[in-house]
Image: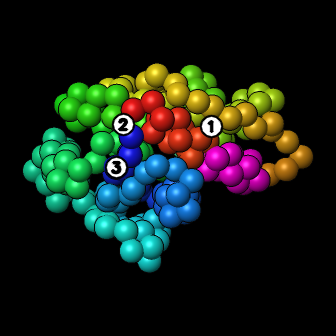
Amino acid sequence: MVLNLGILISGNGSNMVNIAKHCKLKNINCNIKIVLSNKNCGGIKKAKKLNLKSMILEPNKFKNRESYENKVSTLLRDHNVNLVCLAGYMLKLGKKFVKKWEKKIINIHPSLLPAFKGINAQEQAYREGVIFTGCTVHFVDQYLDTGQIIDQRIVKIDRNKPLKDLVKKILNEEHKLYINVLKKLSKEN
Ligand code: GAR
């Protein structure tokens, strides 16, 4: 089945750009229908450059978080989205939103979940002294970074190198992982 993606971002957007590249190359059976960001960020500028439909929706311009998420949901539905991809989206989604899109939201996280949930997961692993970390794509549930794991990739930590090298190495693996997961889900659906 063709996956109609709605991509939610908050930052650089490198995962989003990589997904767009693979859609264009027809390596994955997906179309990016809309890119939404909760703030002005590098990723939204990149989405515009790629001629992707994109919008910034700032939560503080809404009455409350629920009305913000209702607007996000309406936009996704209006654009025929059937899979919501979180790609560096740094806000936790509310229970009602998650219920509406049950098993239709996936997230990428820069650790081997269930280890190192939350922010700065790469740094948490680097400081903890573990030898391996990596990245995970999982379905999103109402809690933080706890939903069913779809796939992971492993990265070995080299402590002779600075943390920024690890972040880069994980991001590189994230790009491959996200594409593999989208391939898998488009075959299953
Ligand atoms: C990625 O490393 C992603 O795993 C992380 O933010 C970065 C976004 O990069 N997400 C989280 O930490 C979510 N908890 P990108 O904007 O270049 O794709």
Q: Nearer the viewer, residue 176 or 90?
A: 176
Instruction: Compare marks 1 and 2 and give the one earlier in the sequence.
Output: 2
The N terminus appears in which quarter of the rendering? Answer: top left
What residue lies at 63% left-to-right and 31% top-to-bottom?
A: 152
- Amino acid on which the number 3 mark rests in the picture: Asn
Magenta includes 85?
no
The residue wearing badge 1 is 135
* Whether the residue under disc 3 has CB within 8 Å of ligand 1: no
Quadrant of the rendered structure where residue 85 is?
top left
Residue depicted at 58% across the width and 34% down the height: 136
Give the dominant element type of the magenta stretch: helix, strand or loop.
helix
Q: Read off the residue under disc 2.
A: 105
For disc 1, the neighbor class at 10 Å (few under 14, some 14 to 19, many from 20) is many
Residue 95, position as x, y percentages in the image = 24, 29
Q: Position of residue 48 (x, y in %)?
A: 39, 74
* SS class, disc 2: strand
Q: Which mark is residue 95?
A: none
**Secondary structure of residue under mark 3:** strand
Q: Which residue is outermost to the bottom?
A: 49
Q: Assess disc 3: are there few (<14), some (14-19) or many (≥20) residues with their C-alpha within 10 Å of its C-alpha.
A: many
Foreground pick, 39 / 127: 39
Q: Which residues are magenta?
A: 163-176
Which residue is at 46% across, 49% downward?
29
Residue type highlighted by circle 2: Ile
Q: Which mark is residue 4?
A: 3
